[in-house]
Image (tube, coloured by chain):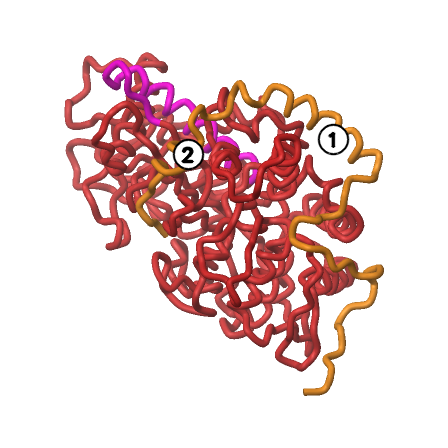
Amino acid sequence: MAIPKVCGIETEYGIVLRGTGDSNPIAASSVLINAYVSDLQRRVGWDFEDESPGNDARGFAREGSMPPEVETHLVNAVLTNGARYYVDHAHPEFSTPECADPLQCVLYDKAGERILTRSMEAAARVLPAGQDIVVYKNNSDRKGNSYGCHENYLMDRQAPFPRIVHHAMPHLITRQIYTGAGKVGTETAQPGGKEVSFQLTQRADFFEEEVGLETTLKRPIVNTRDEPHADAQKYRRLHVIVGDANLAEVSTFLKVGVTVVVLCMIEDDWFGDKDFTFASPVQALRRISCDPGLSEALPLADGTTATALDIQWEYLDLARKYAEERGLGGVGEEVGEEVLRRWEEVLSGLETDPMSLADQLDWVAKYRLIDGYRQRHDLSWSDPKLAAMDLQYHDVRPSRSLFARLPMQRMVTEESVTEAITEPPPDTRAYFRGRCLQRWASCISAANWDSLVFDLGTDPLRRVPMMEPLRGTAAMVDSLLERCSEPAELLELLGS
Amino acid sequence: MAEREQKKKSAPARRAEEVEDVTPVSSEQGEKIKAELDELLDEIDDVLEENAEDFVRSYVQKGGQ
């Protein structure tokens, strides 16, 4: 049986420091995150009297071991909701805590946006007059520079990687029709010099390989990073780098939700001899993105052709049968049903009247808005006003965001989003991490995805391993935590 | 090469529009969205960045992942 698909999203935001000629994005990102963290300290009214100055973290901690490519001395905070907030590749990056299902992922992804908004407000209070920092939840500067929004999915180590590649790739290529965040124009030369007014995704322009380890150049459709942040004997973490950062909650929900369903089906070897491999996957990714009419049939390896919609319908058919026979335990039953329902609704909408989805999907919402403006003012698609609107759609400031002005469907309440800014999800190990940081941040010297390191001042550092993503939940540790008034008691009881 | 067989059948007659011609709004839901869009377009100039050209030119990011 497919294992529960613990999932998460990490987003690199675009960043601009305004009001100065010298805009260093790494410094700006550090200012942004430090401002948020300092503001948090002030806001919760932490008592600093008995604290040592080295311990500057309240509700967050410096992370211990980091992958070498991000081994920097930059800001790196772990928040009380279990998320990680740090500077990566000259961008502020927010990683959601481990989420138990796709809907929870939507919640924490949205909480991430609110944290960035609060960070900008906090930064404005510490920056010199006339300067401010603005962040954008997009994936491209329209000049050939891209930054990512990666998804992570817990998978059974026993699922053979070639099988994952084989059946995940056609899905990752064709899901663009509902996951795309939209882009005016392109950043790569098109075959035959074809003009592209508008494409479905931010990211398709930047993918050059089918499978590989890279994330910053020669990006592959299926990434092979094998770093589970969990028991490596039992699990793998599928790191999906080909998606767009979404603002629309339905887009995020389907991006993660359908992918979770497909990965469950792959684990259970549900595809049999069904094969939707594209003849030229990289070309298919780009051509689908550049075809908002959704009409182009592309060659498959087996000699037939199919449109992106065709393949999504085939995957949905298989998923329906899978749900009937095997259930959706790996997705979360109720959430799984909602994924299937919305998936079908969106495919039907895309087939008959894509614009009817303007309140659900990012690319449709953006297209509708920009094309409406274009027609009203009789502009050409190359007018800089439209490119500016494209960027401003992703502006995270509520007062300037074009997305925020659109009547989009919500999947989570704003009240629950506000709570998720500080509270961890109850049903993954993020709960243990978050609760410990809320109570004993000054005694935690390092927090990582798979461990917490306590520094009680006297003994050597004490490490609490968290190799099981579904342990450390509220159900498992609440009564334990309630019994402990000091971290020493907790460590005693845990035997760490 | 022999003509390729098209994989899927359930879809209605395929459209073959130009890139710009995404199907126009027709449904009731679409009408509602259209009305809201018109309202938004009436006031959007107030929030748009003042100098679009400068704004787009100066938005430069370092590449990331």
Q: Which residue is mark 2?
A: B53
Please name whichever residue, A41 or A204, is drawn nearer the observer in this view of the structure.
Answer: A204
Q: Which chain is red?
A: A
Where residue A169 sits: x, y (%)?
56, 66
When the figure is inspected, residue A406 is found, relative to residue A386, above or below; the finding is above
Q: Which residue is drawn at the image coordinates 44% and 68% (left, top)? A: A209
Q: Residue A360: x percent and y percent?
A: 67, 38
**Which amino acid, by three-letter code, is at mark 1?**
Ile
Which chain does the numbered disc 1 sit on?
B
Which chain did the renderer colour orange?
B
| Residue located farthest toward the bottom when viewing the structure as drawn | B1
Image depth: mark 2 or mark 1 in front = 2
Q: Residues within 10 Å of mark 1 (few under 14, many from 20)?
A: many
Mark 2 / mark 1, whichever is N-terminal: 1
Q: What is the three-letter code of the residue carrying label 2? A: Glu
Secondary structure of the magenta portion, mostly? helix
